Image (cartoon, grey):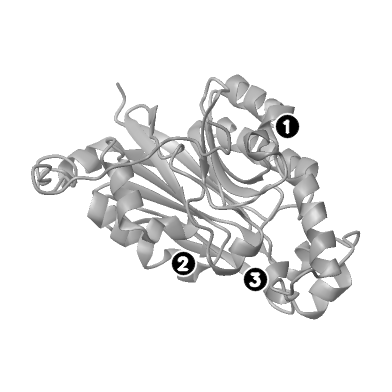
Amino acid sequence: MKDSIKVAIAQIAPIWLSRQKTLEKVMTFVTKAADQNAKLIVFGEALIPGYPFWLERLNGAAFNSSVQKEIHALYSRQAINIEESQLDSLCELAKEKEISIYLGTVERPSDRGGHSLYCSMIFINQGGEIKSIHRKLMPTYEERLSWSIGDGHGLVTHKIPPFTVGGLNCWENWMPLARAAMYAQGEDLHVSIWPGNKRNTEKLIPVIAQESRSYVMGVSGIFRPEDIPDDLPFAEEMREVTQTTLADGGSCIAAPDGSWVIEPVVNKEDLIVVEINHKRVREERQNFDPSGHYSRPDVLSLSVNRERQSVLK
C-alpha cells in the first residue's frame, strides 16, 4: 500500500441558489482534480445551492415576512433531494474518475417530509456510491431560521487508503464530543467544511490537527457581491446591504503536528492539490493517540446515537 495520496480543495463560489449550475461547476472542479491524480476532493459547506446569507442581511428573524417566505420557497426548490436522483451525474463522474468527494449541500430529504432543509455533508466514494449523508447536528445562530437540526446518522468514517477520513460541518468542529466520535473510528484525515472566512479556520484547524494527530483539511467557500445573480427576486435588496465580501475563503491543510501544509488561502477561487503522507500520522501517534494508547476507556467513554431521526417508527 502506498503511504501517500493526493487530496484536493475546491475553494469556489456557488452559482447562488441554482442547484444545476452549481452542480455543473462542481463537476468541472472534480474533473480538474482527478486529472491531477487527486483521490479526494472537498467542497465547502452548503455549496449547493449556497449559504443563506440573506438571513443576516435581510432581517431573517422577521416573523411571517413575505420576503422571507419567498426566499425560503426558492431555497427549498433549489435544495438537493437525493431521492430524486439529483446527484446521479456527480456519482457517475466520481466512478469514472475514481475519485472520492465530500460535498457541502442544503438537503431537502424525503425521509423528513420533503420540505424542511438540512445542512448536509455528503460523501461519495470512488465507486460513485453515496456512502454517508451527515446532517449538521446544530445549525449556528441565524442558520436555525432556515436549517433544521440534524442527527448522528452520518457520524461515520470512510477508507481512502491509506487514510481513514471523516468530516464535520462548520461549527460542529468546535464540538469536542463530535470530534471524539470521529477520532474513535480511527480517523486520521479530518475534513472540516465552512461557508468561508479565514477567521474560522486559521486558529482551529491546527488545534484539531494537534489534538487528533491527523491531517486536517479546512475547506471554505467564497461569496462576493458579484456572486448575487441578477435574476434573483431579492437581488437588488441584497446588493444594497452587501458592499464587501461575505465569505473570503480561508481554505487550508494542517499536518498531524499542527504545522501548515497549505496556509489559509483567501479572496480567490482556487483548486489546491497536495500530496499527504500517512507516515506523518504514524510518527505523531507515537507519543499521543486520542483513541488508542493515550485513551482511558475504563474512565471515559462516549455514546453516539446514529439513528436517523424520523416522525415514524
| Dots 3, 1 in contact, CB < 8 A | no
Q: Which residue is mark 2?
A: 200
Q: Is residue 31 or residue 217 the one in the foreground?
A: 217
Identify the disc placed on residue 227: none
The amino acid type, in three-letter code, at marker 2 is Asn
Q: Residue at x 81, y 62 (%)?
A: 69
User: In the image, is residue 282 above or below residue 129?
Assistant: below
Q: Residue at x 62, y 36 (%)?
A: 30
User: In the image, is residue 153 above or below residue 143?
Assistant: above
Q: Quadrant of the N terminus?
A: top left
| Residue 198, horizontal then vertical, whole percent | 49, 68
Residue 287 horizontal side relative to residue 141, left or right: left
Q: Residue at x 71, y 71 (%)?
A: 60
Q: Which residue is mark 3?
A: 246
Residue 293 horizontal side relative to residue 38, left or right: left
Q: Which residue is mark 1?
A: 86
The amino acid type, in three-letter code, at marker 3 is Leu
